[in-house]
Amino acid sequence: MNGRQAHRTGTLFFSLAMIVIGLALIGQIVGGTGSVISPRLLLGILFLAAGIGRTYIEVRRGRDR
């Protein structure tokens, strides 16, 4: 595995971890352990958006090469 492949694998791993964290934070709100208007919900949405965005960009970048 060269450096470029390691970077791509690491990026995809951390992007998927961000998606899981975002879903977990949102799941806590849906599960009833928080209010609808809470910082936890905002963080969950932001983590989810960042993870999806990073995954999309990395997959698209891989197709161009």
Image (cartoon, helix red, strand yellow):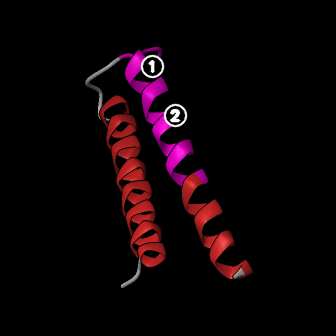
Q: Is residue 48 left or right of residue 40?
A: right
Q: Is residue 65 left or right of residue 30?
A: right
**Within-10-Å neighbours for mark 2: few <14, some 14–19, many 20+:** some
Q: Judging from the image, what secondary structure is the residue with disc 1 in?
A: loop
Note whether 6 is above or below 51 in the view shown: below
The residue lying furthest to the right in this view is 64
Q: Position of residue 46 (x, y in %)?
A: 52, 34
Q: Tell me where the magenta segment starts and ends, as one range.
A: 35-53
Q: Nearer the viewer, residue 17 or 42?
A: 17
At 40% from the left and 71% from the top, the residue drawn is: 9
Q: Which mark is residue 46?
A: 2
Q: Which residue is mark 1?
A: 36
* Quadrant location of the C terminus in the rendered image: bottom right
Q: Position of residue 13 (x, y in %)?
A: 37, 63
Asked if the stretch drawn in magenta spans residue 51, the answer is: yes
Q: Main secondary structure of the magenta part?
A: helix
